[in-house]
Amino acid sequence: MPSVSKVCFFFEQKGFPLKNRGSLKAFIESIFRKEKRKLDSLNYIFCSDKGLLEINRRYLGHDHFTDIISFDLSDSDSIQGEIYISIDRVMENAQKLKLTFKSELHRVIFHGVLHLCGYKDKTQKETKKMRAMEGYYLLMYSY
């Protein structure tokens, strides 16, 4: 009997080209194990700039675009979370950084996991560590 993934993907737009979803979910789950964190459930919601801006305004009081917002909904040591990702922002950032859309999307996906595992990016030192861990997991993920 196949195991049920603790990671789910939801899409504002139908037909979003997220390939190899099964292996991506398994890899996301492996990050939690490597970080010695227990995952209960994680939902990714892929949306537009407009959708994520509304969430940013409503729940965080910020009036600007962002590529990702992570919500830790845990009430125990077992992580439950929701990660909202703006496809528009990821696409624009990939173009600015001269990266593939897929590479930037995976970086942002892993960035959200790292936040839920306790990594922060408010200071320069925290951001440097976060970027290093994003790079580490991007290299480990064979896509």
Image: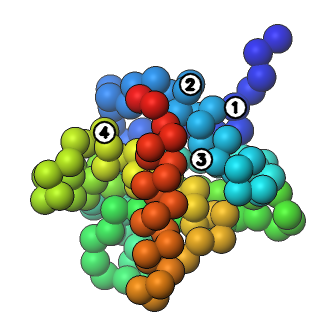
Q: Can residue 73 be seen in this view?
A: yes
**Residues marked 2 and 1 touching at CB (< 8 Å):** yes
According to the image, label 3 marks what residue?
Answer: 43
- For marks 3 and 4, give the CA distance: 19 Å
Q: Quadrant of residue 58?
A: bottom left
Residue 104 x %, y % = 31, 49
Packing grade of label 3 (10 A; few <14, some 14-19, many >=20) is: some
Q: Nearer the viewer, residue 105 or 81?
A: 105
Give the numbered dot on residue 102: 4
Q: Which residue is drawn at 32% across and 28% down?
A: 17
Q: Earlier in the sequence, mark 2 or mark 3?
A: 2
Residue 63's place in the image compared with 1, above or below, is below
Q: Is residue 71 visible?
A: no
Q: Which of marks 4 and 2 is nearer the N terminus?
A: 2
Q: Residue at x 65, y 57 (%)?
A: 81
Q: What residue type is labelled 1?
A: Ser
Q: What residue type is labelled 2?
A: Gly
Q: Earlier in the sequence, mark 2 or mark 1?
A: 1
- For marks 2 and 1, give the CA distance: 8 Å
